[in-house]
Amino acid sequence: MLELNKWFFVQLFNFLLLFVLLYYILFKPLLCHLARREDHIKGSLNSAKTMDKEKETLLHQTELKLSETRSKAGAIFEELSKKGLAIQKETVDLAKKDAAEINRKAKEDIGAEAKKAKEALRKDVEVLSKVIVEKMVGV
């Protein structure tokens, strides 16, 4: 059973004194440290959330720029393809014109050579005819 004598009050006083001392020396600094730690963790979490939002924003902006750049590159490719086809057509047309000119000149040269050959043959035929007539007639 519990007796209420002087030692009880001394022990009660010691307990309360020890409790108060431990509160100010141990519990209060520990609770302050834990509160600061909790604030630091909350701040870190908020900072991480902010960085995640910034990352998402930057990623979205990068994707937009990338798609914009791809569309510009596609347009440039199409434009250069059209220019290349135009240059190719122009070159082919020029080559056709040159070939037609060369063909025309060759036909003219062949015609001139044929005319010269006919003239030469006529002269040869006349000479041969005269020789044949002279041999037949015996002159």
Image (tube, rainbow, N blue to C red):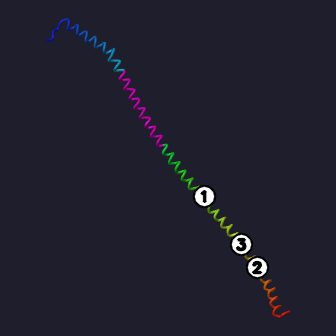
Query: In the displayed structure, does residue 76 sit left or right of residue 102?
Result: left
Residue at 73% over, 75% down: 110
Residue at 84% over, 93% down: 138
Q: Is residue 90 above or below residue 135?
A: above
Which label number is shown at residue 117? 2
Residue 10 falls in image quadrant: top left
As helix, strand or loop, the secondary structure at mark 3 comes to helix
Q: Where is residue 38 shown, x and y percent of the image?
A: 36, 26
Mark 3: give few (<14), some (14-19) or many (20+) Cα within 10 Å: few
Q: Which residue is mark 3?
A: 106
Farthest residue, direction bottom:
137
Q: Is residue 8 magenta?
A: no
Q: Are marks 2 and 3 in contact (CB under 8 Å)?
A: no
Residue 79 falls in image quadrant: bottom right
Residue type, mark 3 in image: Ala
Q: Nearer the viewer, mark 1 or mark 3?
A: 3
Which label number is shown at residue 5? none
How far apart in space, not on screen, are marks 1 and 3 (Cα)? 32 Å
Magenta segment range?
33-60
Q: Is residue 34 magenta?
A: yes
Q: Is residue 16 above or below residue 92?
A: above
Question: Which tag, 1 or 3, sits closer to the chain's start?
Answer: 1
Question: In this orientation, which residue lies closer to the viewer: 78 or 114?
Answer: 114
